[in-house]
Image: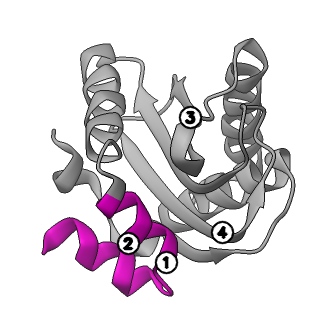
Amino acid sequence: MGLLEIIDKDLIINPLTSVKREDIIRDLVGAYCDKEALDEDQREAIVRAVIDRELIASTAMEKGIAIPHAKIPFLKKSAIVIGVSRIPVDFGGSEKSSIFFLVLASQENPTEHVQLLSSIARLCSSDVFVRMLASSRSADEVYQLFFD
């Protein structure tokens, strides 16, 4: 499954209002869990998996982008939650992040996980795309950037 097949307008948060790394992760995971009607135990398992992955090495990249991600045993299909913050957040990289792509992948399909991460990195190599994403003001604007 490709990046554009996974993007769901209901899983775009713009603006994100949290200002700490763990809170950003909780907001992104929360959006996914609310959409999928997951219970509190599943929510906490996903949050813990993403935070544990961040503790290994920050997923913050250049240009203010972070791609927190984890493989989740009970997921049947991969998902992406996109968040844009007006306030750059210290996500553990050399610069603060304001654009977030949470990638949640099924452990059953590790290749898809790598392909999604690669697709996001390729897309974000465009300075123009990143500037447009950072200046977007709504979930609709973010969604349109992917499909125009």
Residue at mark 1: 135
- The reply to whether the C-beta atoms of the residues labelled 3 and 1 are less than 8 Å apart is no
Residue drawn at point x = 46 percent, y = 80 percent: 136
Q: Amino acid at mark 4?
A: Ser
Earlier in the chain: of badge 4 and badge 2, it is 4
Q: Residues within 10 Å of mark 2 (few under 14, many from 20)?
A: few
Q: Is residue 135 magenta?
A: yes
- Please provide percent x and percent y for residue 140: 36, 85
Q: Is residue 144 left or right of residue 148?
A: right
From this view, report whether residue 145 is shown above or below residue 107. Answer: below
| Mark 1 or 4: the one toward you | 1
Measured in 3D between alpha carbons, the distance from the residue under mark 3 to the one under mark 2, in whole angstroms, is: 17 Å
Q: Is residue 9 visible?
A: yes
Measured in 3D between alpha carbons, the distance from the residue under mark 1 to the one under mark 4, in whole angstroms, is: 10 Å
Q: Residues within 10 Å of mark 1 (few under 14, many from 20)?
A: some
Q: Amino acid at mark 2?
A: Met
Q: Amino acid at mark 1?
A: Ser
Residue at mark 3: 61
Residue at mark 2: 132
SS for callout 1:
helix
- The reply to whether the C-beta atoms of the residues labelled 1 and 2 are less than 8 Å apart is yes
Residue at mark 4: 85
- The reply to whether the C-beta atoms of the residues labelled 3 and 2 are less than 8 Å apart is no
Start-end of magenta stretch: 128-148
Measured in 3D between alpha carbons, the distance from the residue under mark 4 to the one under mark 2, in whole angstroms, is: 13 Å
